[in-house]
Amino acid sequence: MKHDSIWLDGLNFSESPFLDQEIEVDVLIIGGGMTGLSTAYQLIDSKLKVALVEANLIGHGVTSKTTGKLTYLQEDIYSKIKKSRGLDASKSYYLAQREAIFEVQRIIQKHQIECNLSSVSSIAFTNDPKKVSSLKKEAELLRSFGATVEEGNRFPNGKECQYFISVSDTYVFHPLKYLKALKEIIEKSKIQIYERTRIESIDYRKGFYFCKTKQAFVKAKKVVLALHYPYFLFPFVMPGRVTLEKSYVGVLSVDKTYPFSAISVDQPVVSLRYHEDVKKYQFFLYGSHNICQKYNEKENFSPLLDKFSFYDYLWSNIDIITGDSLPYIGLIQDQLFLATGYNTWGMTNGSLAGEILKKQLQGMKTSYDDLFSPKRGVSFKNLLYFPVVFGSNIKAFASGIFFRNKSWYDGRVRFEKREDKDVAIYTDTKGVEHVVLAHCPHVHCNLIFNMEELTWDCPCHGSRFDMDGHCIEGPSNRDIGYKEQEK
Ligand SMILES: Cc1cc2nc3c(=O)[nH]c(=O)nc-3n(C[C@H](O)[C@H](O)[C@H](O)COP(=O)(O)OP(=O)(O)OC[C@H]3O[C@@H](n4cnc5c(N)ncnc54)[C@H](O)[C@@H]3O)c2cc1C
């Protein structure tokens, strides 16, 4: 079993250079996932001078761990948006998702991108009799928007559930083959991509952003934060607006694939899809939770591991959940743009962000500006939920102290003081010790070791580090390698 995403297996991206000099651009895109690359792609024909910087390697962030569905049937999201923002908002979101799927399809066709794009039906289902009526309401809502919705209880693979709704004109694909192709297209344009280039700080002075890396800086008129969980946003206060949800995914070999994908509206959430490449695979996502609420990763993975006796690939992934179920895409302050908060639907919304930002960066308006504006008020639900989030953050902050339970780690992890620093030590199966600082550089939360993926995970805001302390996911913008800090 590989404890990593299937999408990264055997896929070689050619590496772009890192930035080692000062540059000046009109637009700097920070982050090379679905959002950043879609935005750069959309700007290829603009008159703007554009650069994209990626802290690690293109596509290796949250996008590398998605299940890769391109669908507008997203659980019961339209009912949720109708409740939080009204019927018109719900319909606009529906139209935006349809548009985004069409755009990805158009790009794939135009450039003949080989990324296992496959047309499937999308299903939202329940096994809870009490949820049938609300799922029926979701179907009615979708029909009122013009969608054709089927109903049933037997999946194309013969399995049954209490009730499902199903739509067509949706797809599954290989997200990283898609991003690899986008990267190659962008590199042939005048847009420059820099990898292994982490922006460590941003200052706004006299109409320019000065974005510093370790070796250099970028002077930019406009900046796009396409970095999933932005570190640089104090006034915006992300924790007051969003929560972080972690989900667990396994992929297993199967004899047959079926042309559908499905997601439940029940708890624990179940999601599945099929994928055919050299072999045939079934994806199985089981369970998700707010990252501040369940810390023992061994326990968190175990319901998924109990479902099948063997997985070829196993991983977890975190996405950002907004209070009103709508993404944040647009201007947040002086020429600083944000795209995030996709509620686990970032294949459509990341691509959509590219289309919207392309226009906004060139001073044009779009019909989605108000709906997705990051400056929109915090929802009432979020205000009510804030004390809960705050409380669970405090708990997560303290969790490392109170729950450093040795049984979580099979005796392979210990915590100690070295030269006045709190360090955490993981001893690998060959007996080699990997020493890191025990706190996340973001807001100093205690880190927890994830024994399945061998990563240090922050239970407060989702930063992740490999066993040697290299930051693989933000919001932290620093590594925690013990030796690294000594330099
Ligand atoms: C389990 C799971 C399954 C999912 N499945 C689906 C699905 O089937 N369909 C769907 O539509 N969506 C799905 N999603 C959601 C989707 O994967 C995400 O919303 C999307 O990938 C986010 O893309 P992104 O480009 O915003 O972020 P990322 O892919 O994380 O890209 C951000 C990039 O910014 C870089 N970065 C961070 N900080 C800096 C810095 N300081 N300087 C430079 N670079 C930096 C990071 O290294 C990273 O590469 C799923 C989510 C989860 C959790």
Image (cartoon, grey):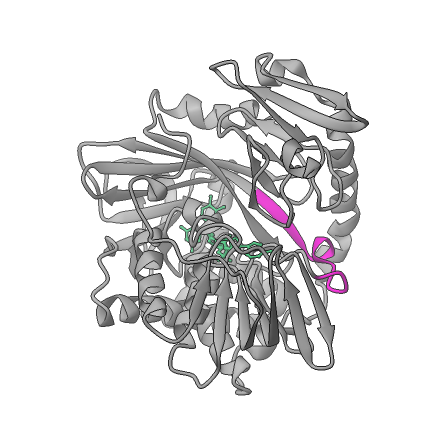
- Residue 73 vs 363, above or below: the answer is above
Q: Position of residue 463 (x, y in %)?
A: 61, 43
Q: Is 429 above or below relative to 71?
A: above
Given residues 395 and 413, the one toward you in this image is 413
Identify whether 424 is placed above or below 262: above
Q: Quadrant of residue 382?
A: bottom right
- Please report the residue visible at 38 percent of the width from the left and 72 percent of the height from the top: 99
Q: Is residue 150 left or right of residue 352?
A: left
Span shown in magenta = 233-245
Q: Nearer the viewer, residue 462 or 119?
A: 462
Whether the magenta-drawn stretch holds residue 126 is answered as no
- Quadrant of image for the N terminus: top left
Residue ID at (18%, 32%): 255
Question: Which is nearer the eye, 377 or 319?
Answer: 319
Q: Is residue 308 visible?
A: yes
Q: How many callouts does the rendering have?
A: 0
Residue 83 screen position, x and y as percent: 61, 63
Q: Can I make out residue 328 in this image?
A: no
Q: Residue at left 53%, top 56%?
A: 197
| Percent x, y of residue 190 | 39, 76
Which quadrant of the structure image shows residue 192? bottom left
Q: For residue 300, what is the image quadrant?
A: top right
